[in-house]
Image (spheres, coloured by chain):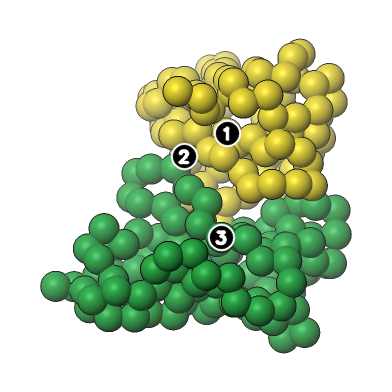
Amino acid sequence: IAGITQAPTSQILAAGRRMTLRCTQDMRHNAMYWYRQDLGLGLRLIHYSNTAGTTGKGEVPDGYSVSRANTDDFPLTLASAVPSQTSVYFCASSPGASTGELFFGEGSRLTVL
Amino acid sequence: GQNIDQPTEMTATEGAIVQINCTYQTSGFNGLFWYQQHAGEAPTFLSYNVLDGLEEKGRFSSFLSRSKGYSYLLLKELQMKDSASYLCAVRDSNYQLIWGAGTKLIIKP
């Protein structure tokens, strides 16, 4: 089934540890995004990529990094996790940066202790 | 700054009609989206408006007035499975999506 896959679905992490959330899509979408969702707040964009080989900063990029080596994969790395990064992380993709709706992965629930 | 406002929570009865409002102030406008998100799940696309007027899709309709910075999502013949959060998002002049905090809709029998 075509779609977007995230891993892990859930993780508990000690503060200071490095963590990479994986995201893969098989829809050949050009644009990909990482959001965090916290209770009472809207989805907040962390980083995005309009096409393979390019990335950009969103609303809340500090403490996170991304790479886009190919069309399908868009991993998100927390270099040194802090408790404020406890959240649900959603990866999403769209056909283009300015066209079409976003398709979301199932989310990764991250708890930093 | 950019802002999307939606009610935090609404309650409606099974079989009834409910209207969820969304007002926005953004730098530019390139379309408005409505998403549905069940608890613990990913958001899924419901509707898209870029021109003024009503878009109907089965039991769901979405309305847009760009001059008023206003949209609503209308859900008819409510079913228990419609209990979810409904997210409004606006694509701004940079083609980035600005998201509201969502409206939690509770359906009672």
Disc number for residue B47:
3
Badges 1 and 2: C-beta atoms under 8 Å apart?
A: no
The amino acid on which the numbered mark 1 sits, given as a three-letter code, is: Cys
Subunit bearing disc 2: A
Whether A91 is drawn above or below B76: the answer is above
**In the picture, which chain is yellow?**
A
Q: Whole-percent x and y of residue A93?
A: 64, 35
Amino acid type shown at disc 3 = Ser
Location of residue B9 (image quadrant): bottom left
Label at residue A88: 2
Could you tell me which chain the residue with mark 3 belongs to?
B
Horizontal side of B58 relative to A37 (left or right) equals: left
Residue at position x 25%, y 66% in the image: B79
Which quadrant would the C terminus of chain B be assigned to in this image? bottom left
**Residue B78 seen:** yes
Specify few, some or many for label 2: CA neighbours under 10 Å numbering under 14, 14-19, or 20 or more.
Answer: many
Question: Dot 1 lies on which element?
Answer: strand
Same-chain check, marks 2 and 3:
no
B86 on left or right of A77 = left
Chain for mark 1?
A
- For mark 3, give the secondary structure: strand
State the image coordinates of residue B85 (x, y, percent, origin top left): 40, 60
Q: Estimate the x, y position of residue A84 in percent, counting from the top left.
A: 53, 41
Are the residues at dot 2 and dot 3 in contact (C-beta closer than 8 Å)? no
Q: Which residue is mark 1?
A: A91
Give me the C-alpha separation between circle 3 and circle 1.
Answer: 20 Å
